[in-house]
Image: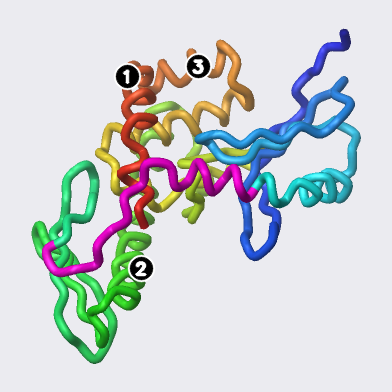
Amino acid sequence: MPTRELISRDLRRLALGAQRVDYVLVRRRGRRGVGLKVDETGLTVSAPSTMPLARIEVLVRESERWVLRKIAEWSHRRVTPVEWIDGAPLPYLGGALVLRIAAGKRIRAGRVEGELRVAARDPGGAEVKRAVTRWYKAAAHEHLAERVGALSRAAGLPPPRFVLSGALARWGSCNSRREVRLAWRLVKARRELIDYVICHELAHLRQMNHSRAFWAEVERQCPDYRRLREELFATDHLYRAF
């Protein structure tokens, strides 16, 4: 049986139906066909090292319905929808913000101590959700960018390019272009879980695989990673509700 030597591991994006799906493309020497896997990390596509990207994406599109169904299954498992009403709790950095809704001419949201105060013309739901989501993305960019910089310096790595992601099924990803992509919903988790995800992706800057050497690098950066990984897997449904 030929050895399937890893050639590259890159984050790419593909339009499937009405969605834009992030996926990890893994190229291996010795592989003959294209394989698709959808799990809690998202879509992974394994392909031969010499197969043109256009051909790979044609084959992925042929399985479009299956891919989108599996992503939806992972994204919505155990998720309890948010009630967009005054007083509802919203997860943030491992704690909760109390949603406060008031009428206003301009849709906006702002944090005041333990409250997220939202003004909306129609307090019935859609405008509130839009304002809350916009605030979370801004807060996530600020917090995650700071942690990527701090943890990369602690690991002795040049800071990578950081990109905020809207992915539902993948908390983070890293590619050979030194780009770390993190889901904005991650800002709902407690700080230790956020740092674990970032350390996981930073470890890929040294090991573009999931070998023993990779996990040794994760452990070097985050000694308690096993417990944190289990906790994130057990609680991640709490962070996907919106």
What's the residue type where badge 3 is placed? Trp
Q: Residue 241: give x, y in percent of width and height.
A: 35, 53
- Placement of the N terminus among the 4 image quadrants: top right
Above or below, comparing residue 181 to residue 101 in the picture? above
CA gap, disc 1 and disc 2: 31 Å
What's the residue type where badge 1 is placed? Arg
Q: Residue 74: give x, y in percent of width and height.
A: 50, 41
Quick one: label 1, few (<14), some, or many (20+) residues within 10 Å? few
Colouring rule applied to residues:
rainbow
- Placement of the C terminus among the 4 image quadrants: bottom left
- SS at badge 1: helix
Above or below, comparing residue 13 to residue 17 in the picture? above
What residue do we see at 56% from left, 11% from top?
A: 212
Mark positioned earlier in the residue sequence (3 or 1) = 3
Quick one: label 2, few (<14), some, or many (20+) residues within 10 Å? some
Q: Which mark is residue 215?
A: 3
Is residue 81 on the magenta stretch?
yes
- SS at badge 2: helix
Residue sitting nearer the eye, 8 or 185: 185
Mark positioned earlier in the residue sequence (2 or 3) = 2
Q: Residue 209: give x, y in percent of width and height.
A: 63, 23
Range covered by the magenta-colored residues: 68-87
- Which residue is the site of mark 2? 134
